[in-house]
Every structure is written in C-alpha cells, then in structure tokens.
Amino acid sequence: MEQEPVRQETDNVLNGDNDDDDLPMLSSHALAALREFMEEQNQLNVDEGSTGETGEKVTLITEDWRLSQFWYDPLTAETVAMEVIDLLANNSHPFPRVACIACPTLYAYIKKMEPDVSVQLLEYDKRFGQYGRDFIYYDYNQPEELPSELKHAFQVVVADPPYLSKECLEKVQQTISFLRTHAQSNVLLLTGEVQKDRAAELLGLHPCGFKPQHSSKLGNEFRLFTDYDPGTRLGGWELEK
C-alpha cells in the first residue's frame, strides 16, 4: 500500500479520523495548542526576503492542511514562475496562456512578476475566487468538468496534484490533456518523487535537477518534472543511465 503524505496523518489527529485504537489520543488542551501552532505556521508571507522582480511582497491566504495545501517557498515559486514566463515568451502562439492546476503559489508569483500574462488558476478552494475570472473551480475527481472554452486553450500547463496517489495523478493527467493545445505546448508537474515512474508513463515527463521546496516542511521529497528538455535551466533533466 502506497504511503500517503505525512500531512494527512497530522490532519487525521486534528480531526479525530484515526481508526487505530492503539494510537495515543491528544487531550482537548493539547489539540487546541496544536491547532493554534498550525495556524501560526500557516500564516504565509512568501516573500521572506525575496520579493520577485516587482520589489513587492507576494502574499497568499492561509494554507488549509485539510485540503492538502502546502505553499512553495520563495525560491521555488520564483524559479518555476520564471521558467513559465520564459516558455510563454518563446512560444510562437500570438497570445500564449498558462493554466495552473492546484498551484496557487505559482499563480500569485507569475501575476506579480508579469501582470499581463494570461494565467488561469484551477483550484478546489473557493477562497481563491478573489482572483475573479482567473479562478476556475476544479475538483480532480471530475477531471473534465470545466468550461468548454478552456479545452485545448493553453500553451503551458503546470500541475501540482493534491495527493500522491495513482488515481489522483491519472485524473489530473486527464485534465492536462483537456487543457493543453495539441502542438507547441509544455507540461510541468510538481509532485512527489514516488510518482516518478507514473509521470513518465502517463505524461512522458522526466525529473529535473531542481527540487521544489515548501514553506512547511514535508516528509515527502518533491520533484519537478517536464515534458521538454530544459537544457541548462532547472538543473537539466536527470536521465537514467
């Protein structure tokens, strides 16, 4: 059985969802203290000394661990955002667009670094409705339940599936196929190392040397996968020898 992210175990403790009677139960006071600590840790100003090209802070709403939300650290967000911006700049389409699937940190950085870039954020969390028309409600369990005008409309698609499971990646793959144009498009995937073989099988992706990091420390090693050779960028492809 595949091990799910450590973040889900913490959530189970907080919500009393653990069915193992042998595990210790926290007292109400301990639970309250843990909730308070998590809320403090989740207050995110992702600039932390790194403000991108605009010189202004990039801020996001609080992470919700119940929704498996963990925002990228500034270096990761800036690095991937710059890669996306470069891909769009070198795309032959007159009006290239990027879709961000479940990666709001990336959306925020792209819009801060290049406000005129056309970016669509697909997210389950309706709090991101504050982004107006850039926000589309998205449930990976219904991978193609999206507005018809989004079909084959994006030259760059970036996805960060919320769970490290085969089912989740397969459904997100369906969404990627729905969104991307048939030609001259690029796919970037940020997910756990454990998805390496599936990423190659489902999407033809290879891992890059650059390894994404999160502001909250996770127990799973994350990787950045692409369907194109980034050359000297992103640490290059790590190909099997």
Image: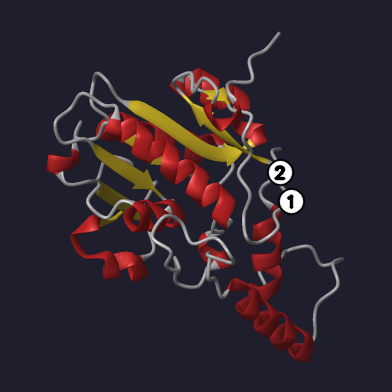
Farthest residue to the top: give it.
241
User: Which residue has dot 2 on it?
Assistant: 3
Residue at 48% from the left image edge and 35% from the top image edge = 189
- Residue 220 percent coordinates (x, y): 70, 46
**Up-down: is 104 above or below 152?**
below
- For residue 176, say whether it is visible: no
Q: Quadrant of residue 34?
A: bottom right
Distance from label 1 to label 2 (Cα)? 11 Å
Q: Position of residue 1 (x, y in %)?
A: 71, 38
Q: Quadrant of residue 128?
A: bottom left
116 left or right, relative to 226: left
Q: Are marks 1 and 2 in contact (CB under 8 Å)?
A: no
Mark 2 secondary-structure assignment: loop
- At horizontal 38% and vertical 60% (from top left) the residue drawn is 54
Q: Is residue 119 left or right of residue 188?
A: left
What is the quadrant of residue 3 in the picture? top right
Amino acid type of the residue tagged 2 in the rendering = Gln
The tag on residue 35 is: none
Q: Point out residue 228 in the picture as x, y percentages from the top left corner.
A: 44, 20
Q: Residue furthest bottom?
A: 29
Can residue 175 be seen in this snapshot? yes
Q: Which mark is residue 219?
A: 1
The residue drawn where x is 43% and y is 45% is 81
Q: Nearer the viewer, residue 141 or 121?
A: 121
Residue at image x 43%, y 51%?
Answer: 106
Rendering coords of residue 47 (x, y %): 53, 65
Q: Residues within 10 Å of mark 1 (few under 14, many from 20)?
A: few
Q: Give the mark nearest the N terminus, 1 or 2.
A: 2
Query: Looking at the picture, which amino acid does disc 1 mark?
Result: Gly
Q: Secondary structure at mark 1?
A: loop
